Structures are given as structure tokens and as C-alpha cells.
Amino acid sequence: MMPFPSTRRSRALLAVAAVLLLPGCLSIGDRAELAVYAPAVRAAASVDGPRLDRTLAVAEPNASTALDSTRIAVRPEPGRLQVYAGAIWADTAPALVQSALVDALSASGRFRAVVRPTDGVSSDLLLRLDLRHFEALYAPGARRPTVVVELQATLVEARGARVAASRRFRAEQPAEGEALPDVVPAFEAALCEVSDALLPWLLDHAETPPR
């Protein structure tokens, strides 16, 4: 990894592997231990309306090669994508987003079931996703990053493959500091924000089955 223009910022990223308060660590052969992070996302905020007797399948998001990885992405400046040293996600970013949305939407209790297409369960609706952003971004002159999570969501009726609706969701959450343990909660908050916005939109467009 190339160093950031800011020496202080470089030290913050390279020191991640030495942080003591970590969710978990992984040692690979003779390589230094990696800090392993798994963002936790609460249930989507409750909204008014009936519980739908429909099953929703949430697909794993499509993503660029840079984001379809276990490495934790950071932009030290616009147009320049790097990764945090000494740390990884517990799964690839698209898989983490899929799991977070399945868990949050299922816990909302608004659908008969929320599943993955690979679960082998017949579904009424399919949520297709494109992961456009999942990184920590430093604005010019900023001393701490803002996490950006952006998804393009397309809701499809499984019967007939009819597109019911499509919309882009974007959340930006400032981190409490520049060290990675201060940045990961911002990823969690951004995922929660996207989930909270996604649920009412899904209910608005999934309530009435096609004739």
C-alpha cells in the first residue's frame, strides 16, 4: 500500500494491525495478524403498514473488482482508492451487505420471509443490487473520513421477471476518528441508514402482487 500524503494518516492506517480492541484476529502463516471486522446492523426501523404475505429474495450485490474483496477500502483523496493495512472484512463487501440486509429486513417482520436466491426457496420478489460505493472517503483537508455506502436497488417480480421499481440509495456517515476501530462503526451506521430507507420503499412497491 502506498503511503497517504499525510504522514499522520499513514501512521493511523499502518497501525491498525497493532490495535488491541479488535473483534478478532487471523494469522496466515508467517504473515502478521490481520484484524477481522464484521459490521453489525440492527433491524430496519419499523414503518406503518400491513405485514406482506410475500417472500423476498435479496441477491448478493454486483460490485467492481476493487469492492468485491475482503479488503477495507479507503479513498485518501477523490479518485484514489486504497485499502487499510493489516485488516480485512469477515467476508467480501457484497456478501457483507447482502447478509446485513437479509438480517435487517427479516427482523423487521414485514415479509413472510426474507431469503437469499441461493437458499432454494421459492420467492415472490427479487431485490437485485449494485454496490457502487462501500468505502471510507477523506474530503480535501479532512482529518477523519466519511463512510459512503451506495446501492442501486431494483425490485423484480419473480413471476414474469417484471421490474416493479428501481432506485439508488446512498448514506454518508462521518467516522469518530481516523483509526479503523473508529471507522467501522460508521460503516455499520451507513448500512443501517440504507436499510432504514430501503424498507419503506420495498413495502410501497411490493404490497400488491401483479394480476
Image (spheres, rainbow, N blue to C red):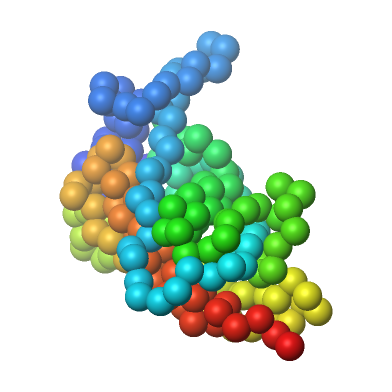
Indicate the quadrant where residue 146 lies: bottom left
Give the vertical position of 105 relative to 49 (above or below): above
Residue nearer the viewer, 104 or 193? 104
Q: Residue at left 42%, top 59%? A: 108
Indicate the quadrant where residue 124 lies: bottom right
Residue 79 in the figure: left or right of residue 177: right
Residue 11: x %, y % from top left: 27, 35
Q: Residue furthest top?
A: 30
Give the vertical position of 11 relative to 165 (above or below): above
Give the vertical position of 105 relative to 87 (above or below): below
Residue 105: x %, y % from top left: 47, 59
Report if residue 93 is visible in the image.
no
**In which quadrant will I find the C terminus?**
bottom right
Give the vertical position of 190 relative to 16 (above or below): below
Residue 28 in the figure: left or right of residue 1: right
Residue 146 in the figure: left or right of residue 151: left
How many discs appear?
A: 0
Residue nearer the viewer, 43 or 15? 43
Q: Residue at left 39%, top 24%? A: 24
